[in-house]
Image: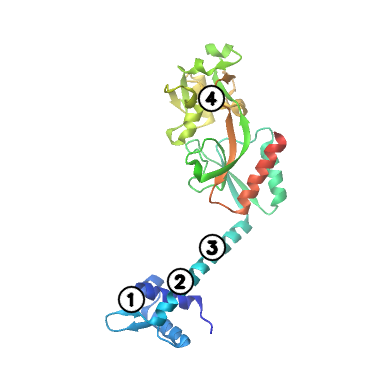
Amino acid sequence: MDVHGRDLRYFAAVAEELHFTRAAERLYVSQPALSKQIRMLEKQLGAALFERDRRDVRLSPVGTALLPYAQRILAEWEAAQGAVARAVADGAAELVVGMSTSPGRGGVLPAIRSRFTAARPDARLRLRHVGWHDATAGLADGTCDAAFVWLPLPDPDRYRWVVVAEEPRLVALPDTHPLAERQTVDFADLLDEPFLALPDSAGPLRDHWLATDARGGRPARVGAEVASTEETYEGLVAGLGVVLLAAGNAPLVTLGGVVTRPVRGISPSRFVLAWRADDRRPLVREYAKACELAAESIG
């Protein structure tokens, strides 16, 4: 005896609603068509699945026995369809990688690409630029599958990552600033300076680039908020504040009128490739592995 998935789906809908009209609406079929299908299933089984009168529909003992099995089969089939969809999507092999800062540090991005392409020659890699307002570079809202980001991340338990680069934090300041004459700056000498800060939406990353943990409880003075490299440079040359940045990003702002100096008394920055902890697709893991290997080879 062969019973189709449609038959079980129709039976389960009626069993859960205990009302043929509501079940038909839920299934987007007509009530006569649903009733006919249930009668055909009962004929195949050789037993009534429902006890009906003019007002009520109840499960028969046979229907009661069948229902948990039908629900389990339907749930397994739904899971199977999801697995197939994921396999098809993975076979299509497009990976969207977000970034707010270019990972082209010491040739690491070409090294990652070459390793990933060797492992997955069928894959399409799409890089997506995300503004500084989103510290997760598209991971939180699901628009990116993986992302190059700075630690710390908001809601860190939601993510996994591999470190691509660890770099000292420098201070960038106008070349006319009194501290620009020094070869190295103590962070204690920056405590009263106005700082350029990321938007509030950047969360803990804003605090990281303000070095809040090294201020001994003293709040940072924010001279202006910046959301791009261009705004940072303009804020520096306008004298709105100084800013901490990773050593690898120094060339982005030292375009004239701005210098960078090493800072004593603060921890280094960590640049990582991150992905959502619940995303177990092989494509994501293979890209992460390529990042790990590239970082090891260059480091």
Label 4 or label 1, whichever comes before in sequence order: 1
Marks 1/3: CA distance? 29 Å
| Residue displayed at 47% across by 18% down | 191
Marks 1/2: CA distance? 17 Å
From the viewer's side, name the closer residue of 109 and 215: 215
Q: CB under 8 Å between callouts 4 and 2?
A: no
| Residue displayed at 68% across by 54% down | 122
Q: Mark 3 points at which residue?
A: 82
265 to 96, vertically: above or below: above
Q: Name the residue under label 1.
A: 19
Residue placed farthest to the left in the image?
55
Label 2 or label 3, whichever comes before in sequence order: 2
* SS label for mark 3: helix
From the viewer's side, name the closer residue of 99 and 58: 58
Marks 4/3: CA distance? 45 Å
Task: State how the image is colored.
Answer: rainbow
| Residue displayed at 47% across by 85% down | 45
Q: Mark 4 points at which residue?
A: 244
For this view, does 125 lie left or right of residue 47? right
From the viewer's side, name the closer residue of 257 and 103: 103
The residue carrying pointer 4 sits among few (fewer than 14), some (14 to 19) or many (20 or more) residues within 10 Å by Cα, namely many
Q: Label 3 is placed on what type of residue?
A: Gly
Choose top left, top right, bottom left or bottom right for residue 60: bottom left
Q: Position of residue 93 (x, y in %)?
A: 63, 54
Q: Mark 2 points at which residue?
A: 71
